[in-house]
């Protein structure tokens, strides 16, 4: 029997994961059988529980060393949950959300803007409907997600919202409106103040992407009363 390798399997995997052992060096394992021999390897494959323990230890190391590490799949999500990690859906930061596999930067931006606007989610159905993701993706995230309800909006001072019933042309253009659309908005709000985004969309027929980008960024004050239109004259 040849000499036992100085690194046990767990140690080799940890060193490989942290870049302290190159794949080439790991391949030079005296315990491995000679490719030209007929001797089968004597290493017994770890059980599922042992394998999970190894993966969990490696993930724990990565999460501690790399704060921005993104979980690669549902298995890593489950292992992170077993390590005690949680994502508070109604208070999570952008960095928290970006840890999840399969989430895009645009979806994270929408979640953060809704949170700043005081919108809270009560369960996986809300999250799936909001992000328009397959149920399997949300199910894969579930071990990490916590849905806690809060009476107050998140701490900190969110950026001031643009009041669409009072905003000047420059403010409207900063929201992505063209000159033509600005003029339409001004004419329409002179008739009556906008009530909310749904009312604005119904009256102006703006692109859905533009309306969505305004969530958490705009508000609707009472506005100024528009000019009164003369009553039509009765015939005769």
Image: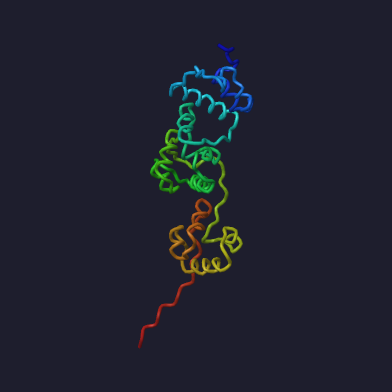
Q: Residue furthest left?
A: 236
Where residue 20 sits in the image (x, y, percent)? 64, 25
Look at the picture and state if 98 lies above or below 23: below
Locate the N terminus by quadrant.
top right
Residue 22: quadrant of the picture: top right
Colouring convention used in this rendered image of the protein: rainbow
Of 33 and 113, the residue lying toward us: 33
Query: Is 39 situated above or below 208?
Result: above
Q: How many marks?
A: 0
**Relative image position of residue 31 (x, y in whole percent):** 56, 17
Residue 164, compared with residue 115, is above or below; it is below
Quadrant containing the C terminus in the rendered view = bottom left
**Residue 119 screen position, x and y as percent:** 45, 46
At a point 61% along the width and 62% down the height, the residue shown is 170
Instruction: Name the one closer to the observer, 49 or 97.
Output: 49
Q: Residue, x 51% and y 58% (percent of image)?
A: 210
Q: Where is residue 221 in the image (x, y as percent from the top left)?
A: 49, 57
| Residue depicted at x 54% and y 46% | 105
| Residue in front for this viewpoint, 177 or 9 | 9
């Amino acid at each position: 029997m040849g000499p036992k390798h100085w690194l046990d399997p767990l140690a080799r995997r940890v060193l490989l994961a942290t870049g302290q052992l190159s794949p080439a060096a790991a391949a030079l394992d005296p315990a491995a059988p000679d490719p030209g021999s007929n001797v089968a390897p004597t290493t017994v494959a770890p059980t599922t529980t042992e394998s999970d323990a190894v993966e969990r230890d490696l993930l724990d190391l990565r999460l501690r060393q790399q704060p921005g590490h993104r979980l690669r799949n549902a298995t890593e999500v489950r292992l992170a949950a077993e390590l005690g990690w949680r994502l508070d859906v109604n208070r999570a930061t952008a960095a928290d959300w970006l840890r999840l596999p399969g989430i895009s930067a645009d979806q994270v931006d929408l979640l953060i803007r809704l949170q700043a606007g005081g919108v809270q989610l009560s369960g996986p159905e809300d999250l799936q409907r909001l992000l328009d993701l397959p149920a399997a993706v949300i199910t894969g995230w579930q071990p990490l997600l916590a849905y806690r309800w809060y009476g107050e909006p998140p701490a900190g001072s969110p950026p001031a919202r643009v009041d669409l019933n009072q905003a000047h042309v420059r403010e409207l253009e900063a929201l992505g409106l063209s000159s033509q659309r600005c003029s339409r908005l001004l004419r329409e709000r002179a008739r009556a103040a906008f009530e909310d985004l749904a009312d604005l969309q119904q009256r102006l027929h703006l692109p859905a992407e533009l309306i969505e980008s305004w969530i958490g960024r705009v508000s609707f004050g009472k506005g100024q009363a528009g000019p009164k239109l003369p009553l039509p004259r009765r015939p005769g």
